[in-house]
Image (spheres, rainbow, N blue to C red):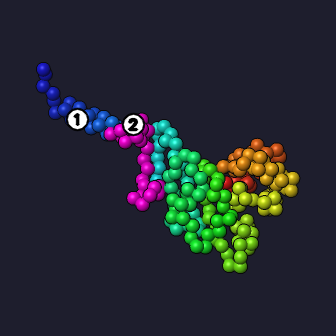
Amino acid sequence: MPELSRNQVFIYAAVAVALLLVGARAIRGEGGTDASFAAADSGGGEVSGSFSTGGESGDLVVDVTGAVRRPGVYRMPAGSRVDDAVTRAGGPTGRAELEAVNLAARLADGQQIVVPERLPGGAGGSVSAAAEDGPISLGTATVEQLEEIDGIGPVTAGDIVEFRDEHGGLSSVDQLDQVPGIGPATMEALRERLQP
């Protein structure tokens, strides 16, 4: 058997280490062909960065902000609901206006969940303030709130509410492109003012 050179031994050792790492990753269930980077804190799934060049893991990354105990970006399992994301963010604060958020809506990858704060003077003032200052929850938006969005009149607002009710809620603002009368410009206005 011929003797191996120092460089050949080094190359074989590097290949062996790489194969061991890929095998260990496959055993852990993260998939051996997905080259992804995700930095998570030790406190429960907060993601500070994500890079993926391989297959889809099925997880969603969402941004939870507003009146929650630990706002941040979190990795959630596919099929999770807004309520799951709020819970992962430490739950609502005492000033959270949960009535303004559809907690039953399914999460979409890249979604931002804004939990507004209750304003002094009662719940009625906080809902109208949320409609003026921040995104409106698609799951609870009234016809009147939808009419405040540029390009939405009373007929289209009624069609949106009817479409939402017929489909048992909506998990994404993008589903509204199926409503007659909503074009690309209106969809942009909806994306700015609505959240699932």
Cβ atoms at labels 1 and 2 below 8 Å apart: no
Question: In which quadrant of the rendered image does the N terminus lie?
Answer: top left
Q: Given this view, does label 1 or label 2 mark the residue nearer the observer?
A: 2
- In the image, what residue type sits under mark 2? Gly
Residue 42 percent coordinates (x, y): 39, 58
Residue at the top extreme of this rendering: 1
Q: Secondary structure at mark 1?
A: helix
> At 55% across and 56% down in the image, what residue appears?
84
Residue 67 percent coordinates (x, y): 58, 68
> At 71% across and 50% down in the image, what residue appears?
169
> At 74% across and 72% down in the image, what residue appears?
124
- In the image, what residue type sits under mark 1? Ala
**The magenta segment:** 24-47
The reply to whether residue 193 is visible in this rendering is no
**Which residue does the numbered mark 1 point to in the structure image?**
13
- Could you say which is closer to the camera, residue 196 or residue 188? 196
Magenta stretch: residue 26 in it? yes
Q: Please tell me in which quadrant of the rendered image residue 127 appears.
A: bottom right
Q: Secondary structure at mark 2?
A: loop
**Which residue does the numbered mark 2 point to in the structure image?**
32
Q: Residues within 10 Å of mark 2 (few under 14, many from 20)?
A: some
